[in-house]
Image (tube, coloured by chain):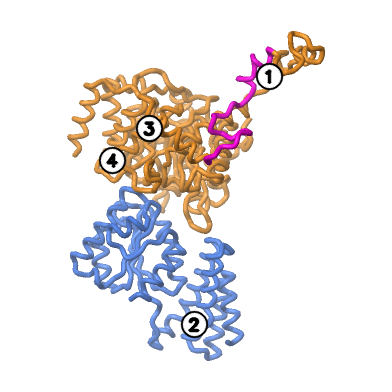
Chain colours: A orange, B blue
Amino acid sequence: MNPILTQVQAARMHAASLSVLSRTGVKVGHAEALDLLLSAGARRDEEDRILIPAHVIEEALEKARASSSRIQLYSRDGEPAICLEAGPTYFGTGSDALQIRDLDTGEIRPAQLRDVGINATVADAVGYDFVMTMGLPDVDNVYPRVYAELIRHSTRPAVVTGVSLADMQHTFHIAEIVAGGKEALRAAPRLVGYVEPISPLFLDEEGVAKLLFMAENEHPFLFAAGANCGATAPVTVEGGVVQANAEFLAGMTIALLKNERARVISGANTSSMDMRTTVTCYGAPEWAKTVAMYAALGEYYGLPSWGTAGCSDAVEPDFQAGVEAYESILLALQSRSTLVHDMAYLKHGLLYDARMIVLSRMLVDRARKLLRPLDFSPAALAGEVIDDVARARAGADNYPMHEHTYGHFRQALWLPPDYWERGQEHTRHLPERLDEIVRDILAGHRVPPLPAHVDAAIDTFLDTLA
Amino acid sequence: MSRVLERLSTAILEGDKDKAARLVERALDQGVPAKEILDNGLMPGMDEVGARFRRGDMFVPEVIMSADAMQAGLDLLRPHLVAGGVELVGKIVMGTVKGDLHDIGKNLVDMMCEGAGFEIVDLGFNVPPEAFVEAIKEHKPDIVGMSAMLTTTMRAMGYTIKAIEEAGLRDRVKIMVGGAPVDAEFAKRIGADGYGSNAATAVELAKQLISAN
């Protein structure tokens, strides 16, 4: 059960978002989208705001439920990978960090293309369910280039960003090369497009153009506003979610009006603005809370939900990073958020540090163990075992020697990795030990290469962009 | 210092716009010179706001209210200051660069700089380099402030500085930059004079750039 928002409360949040859409409406900077909305029953007020009545949204939601309640994503190589539906939570990294902690010097420096490959290798090795770029180097045509780098170093499904429509078209074209054509990619989607409105309540031309591209081609996508409490949205998390959810609903409606087979993921990014420094917080409890709220809304809509967790405003993988990452991971799992991104982001979304990629993934295992449902079977309640030990039967008068311990400890307990301190005193601190893990991964983990002709075709395509 | 100026400082600190305006009027009625009202009433209030903000005792929404109260006082004072030949702290031409439609951060900087006594000429968002150049010719600012929210549009800051250089205006203005993806290293690389990580430090930076002039 969602610890933050019940289904009854989710219905109230939804009603509040509908009220925003019919009363305040959205600005729409795209002619075709405007036509779609107006023909469906929306109306334009004297301030050029597009007021969308509830029934238009509800009809679109009905179609979205049919097209998107279950979205199967495939690996780079076309194997079923993760299924976005009610229940499971999948964790992935984040995208366009401008800075990287250099593995050799330890210094923070601008991201380079090769960092994307390094981080993708680490993310692939430690078992993230999906990947995002984890670095945004200052190169031309950066978005298709980082996607190419990503799939050369990880076989996981990806979520991709891009500023322009062309960025998205180029990136998805690469995915088509890998899949073996447009139809093959449609049948087995390997990537999700990250599209966003501009909060508050502005659906700009480029953003909507990307959304329509996703809808038309049935590429799974999300329309996640960066609605930050106190900055681009009301300061209360309730108000922030009402607004950003309204923005999502407006975009979802346009997409489903364009193509009723459009595949859409619900939710948004609602954190808070730090009231001293004005940065967007990535480790704030407010963001962990809104992820749970969007998960409840997703459940209410019958749609997969977008989430954020495992990240921090700290600059190092330190105490603060651990606290913030774990808190958000725990809430994302408890609320059953579907697609949880930004794992391992540091420095409020500016920095990637490969050590944090390892740490955040490990914290998922820990949280999953913590949240494992209780088992009321005789074996778990262990009456027989208690009796055995008390009466010194079954060859054991203590628990360590009892077969029950041997048979159950792996399922029953969280078994931390050897770099976690448990009694034994380590001579080096956690960040140093994480650094070793990263080095071991990079020395040993091999991601199967793309077929040579595919690899070459990607290069040929990227050359045409230069 | 007169009682009314002390109360004016407090009104600024408390972010009480109406009270600040009333007290400026009262001080003017009592014959206190405009420059003295500015220096001993409004400014000490805002300086204390700045100090408390840096200590972490005040937060951005409170600073905005104080800046707003300061602005209300300044609006009443400005005609008297101009008549008396008193100049404001300085003039800033501000804008979000070409290709970028985000202006909330820039608006915060506008507001807080105005609160600190600067005159702001706001060019809005999606401002092409040539519009910055024209604004420098027209308004003769001390400082040009540029903002970008996106990693892709931040490059337009460099193009704008280039355009200002090519127009032969670079030595007439100081340039400060800010926005989510920008940092001090980037600011240096594109040839800006300074970088503000947030609205409050932007104000400090603007003051420094003026005093360095």
Q: Amino acid at mark 2?
A: Asp
User: In whole angstroms, how far apart are the C-alphas of marks 4 and 1?
Assistant: 49 Å
The quadrant holding residue B159 is bottom left
Residue A407 magenta-highlighted: yes
Residue drawn at the location 22% of the way across and 61% of the way down: B162
Asked if labels 3 and 2 touch by Cβ distance under 8 angstroms, the answer is no
Asked if labels 3 and 1 share a chain, the reply is yes
Q: Amino acid at mark 1?
A: Asp
User: In whole angstroms, how far apart are the C-alphas of marks 4 and 2?
Assistant: 51 Å
Choose mark 3 or mark 4, whichever is in front.
Answer: 3
Residue B55 position, x and y percent, is 56, 65
Q: The numbered mark 2 sits on a residue in which chain?
A: B
Relative to A71, say whether A14 is above or below. below
Residue topped by disc 1: A375
The quadrant holding residue B21 is bottom right
- From the image, give the main secondary structure of the stretch colored magenta: loop
Asked if labels 4 and 3 touch by Cβ distance under 8 angstroms, the answer is no
Residue topped by disc 2: B39
